[in-house]
Image (cartoon, helix red, strand yellow):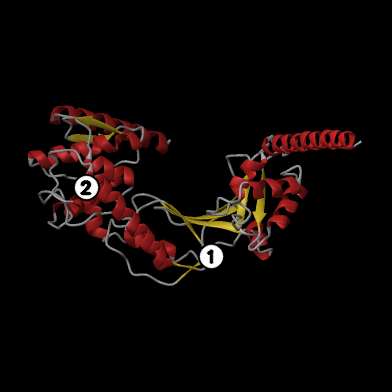
């Protein structure tokens, strides 16, 4: 009898073990399988939320198929306490391990709405966009100039206290004065700041918080430019006619102001490098303009002959070498071009009518390019007069 009972018990144990193994196998398979989401979604992990609350919300929003399985799997990999507050984008079909990686990653929140305050040569602009989950291109909600009436679509978001990402985008080639003046219109920033040294601010897009101190933003820009310049200087090409990172920054600012075509930066840098090496004057209009305006806005007219004839520290038609300071805040690309110019014999360039420039090694070639440019200007003038 006891043998019979023991045999039955052994059989039952084997069955239970087999069932448990099957359950584990099924659970493991479901844990690693693609999730039920058919479209990407934004998902918020509230500050201080428990794993149970988050897993229940994930199931309710259709991100995972089972809240309990998500909790069990999270505990099994010992990540129960790794949830990070924030808003995240979860792609379609994300498995439970992938969802767990996303909601424990931390970092900046991915809000559907963003406000970008853009600093440009023509003045600041506010751009409000909505990003649809799973789609790379945001949808325009509102675009306006500070000082104009705020579009109703934006005020509605503000009135409803909708969480948004706030950014400051600084275009390359602005002066330090233009950046500081432009930031005065960003009413979501606080505080004041004096104008930093020219060229020391890195053009880029910076994420900020509402109520952030503008001085902290300026410091971030300064530190970033310092790092970019140090890195570029450390890997500079040999034999350059510039003796310091500061001179590289000056040259980069001139390159930045002379061309808006990315592919031309190293060519333009080569022209000025060759001129410096040959003892030629730089003869560049942007430096003359900076000497007239002190970097405080656009000149708004052509340069007078008397201004070209006048000796000033920034008139590179009248002085040898570089001006005493940068004339704008150059991009990282312009800085790298200044310390690694193209290998070419060009010492002249002029506009070619396409937005770019025609380059030349000899004065005869340059004069021909100038004649072609003047013909283009004359033709354009004739068309505009019709």
Which image quarter holds the C terminus? top left
- Residue 381 relative to residue 1: left or right: left
In the rendered structure, are the residues bearing label 2 and label 1 in contact, judged by CB atoms less than 8 Å apart?
Answer: no
Name, please, the residue furthest toward the left.
279
Question: Residue visible at 29% across and 44% down?
Answer: 334
Relative to 359, is 99 above or below? below
Q: Where's residue 51, x and y in %?
A: 68, 56
Total labels: the figure holds 2
Q: Where's residue 382, x and y in %?
A: 37, 34
Relative to 76, is 208 above or below? below
Name, please, the residue furthest toward the right.
1
Q: Which residue is mark 1?
A: 210
Q: Of 158 and 360, which appears nearest the observer?
A: 158
Q: CA distance from mark 2 to mark 1?
A: 36 Å
Quarter of the rendering containing residue 266: top left
- Residue 115 relative to residue 280: left or right: right
Quarter of the rendering containing residue 123: bottom left
Q: Of 302 and 364, which appears nearest the observer?
A: 364
Q: Nearer the viewer, mark 2 or mark 1?
A: 1
- Residue 187 relative to residue 279: left or right: right
Which image quarter holds the N terminus? top right
- Callout 2 secondary element: helix
Mark 1 surroundings within 10 Å by alpha-carbon count, few (fewer than 14), some (14 through 19), many (20 or more): some
Question: Residue visible at 20% across and 36% down?
Answer: 270
Question: Residue visible at 29% across and 30% down?
Answer: 375
Q: Of 124 and 243, which appears nearest the observer?
A: 243
Residue 141 in sight here: no
Q: Where's residue 346, x and y in %?
A: 18, 32
Q: Earlier in the sequence, mark 2 or mark 1?
A: 1
Q: Which mark is residue 251?
A: 2
């Amino acid at each position: 009898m006891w043998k019979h009972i023991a045999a039955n018990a052994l059989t039952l144990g084997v069955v239970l073990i087999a069932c448990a193994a099957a359950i584990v196998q099924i659970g493991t398979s479901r844990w690693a399988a693609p999730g039920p989401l058919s479209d990407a979604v934004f998902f918020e992990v509230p500050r201080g939320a428990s794993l149970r609350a988050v897993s229940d919300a994930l199931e309710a929003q259709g991100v995972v198929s089972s809240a309990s399985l998500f909790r069990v799997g999270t505990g099994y990999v010992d990540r129960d306490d790794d949830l990070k507050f924030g808003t995240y984008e979860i792609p379609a079909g994300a498995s439970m391990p992938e969802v767990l990686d996303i909601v424990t990653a931390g970092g900046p929140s991915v809000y559907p709405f963003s406000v970008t305050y853009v600093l440009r040569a023509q003045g600041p602009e506010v751009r409000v966009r909505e990003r649809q989950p799973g789609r790379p291109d945001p949808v325009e909600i509102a675009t306006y100039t500070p000082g104009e009436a705020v579009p109703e679509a934006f005020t509605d978001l503000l009135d409803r206290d909708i969480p948004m990402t706030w950014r400051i985008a600084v275009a390359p080639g602005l002066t330090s004065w233009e950046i500081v003046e432009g930031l005065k219109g960003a009413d979501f920033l606080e505080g004041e700041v004096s104008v930093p040294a020219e060229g020391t601010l890195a053009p880029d897009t910076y994420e900020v918080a509402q109520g952030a101190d503008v001085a902290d933003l300026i410091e971030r820009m300064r530190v970033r430019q310092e790092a970019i310049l140090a890195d570029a200087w450390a890997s500079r090409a040999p034999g350059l006619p510039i003796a310091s990172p500061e001179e590289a920054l000056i040259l980069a600012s001139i390159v930045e102001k002379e061309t808006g075509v990315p592919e031309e930066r190293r060519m333009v840098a080569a022209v000025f490098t060759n001129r410096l090496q040959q003892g030629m004057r730089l003869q560049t209009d942007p430096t003359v303009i900076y000497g007239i305006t002190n970097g405080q806005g656009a000149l708004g007219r052509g340069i007078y002959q008397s201004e070209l004839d006048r000796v000033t520290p920034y008139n590179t038609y009248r002085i040898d070498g570089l001006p005493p300071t940068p004339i704008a805040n150059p991009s990282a690309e312009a800085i790298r071009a200044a310390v690694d110019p193209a290998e070419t014999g060009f010492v002249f360039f002029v506009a070619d009518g396409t937005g770019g420039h025609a380059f030349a090694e000899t004065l005869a070639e340059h004069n021909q390019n100038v004649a072609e440019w003047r013909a283009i200007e004359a033709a354009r003038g004739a068309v505009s007069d019709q």
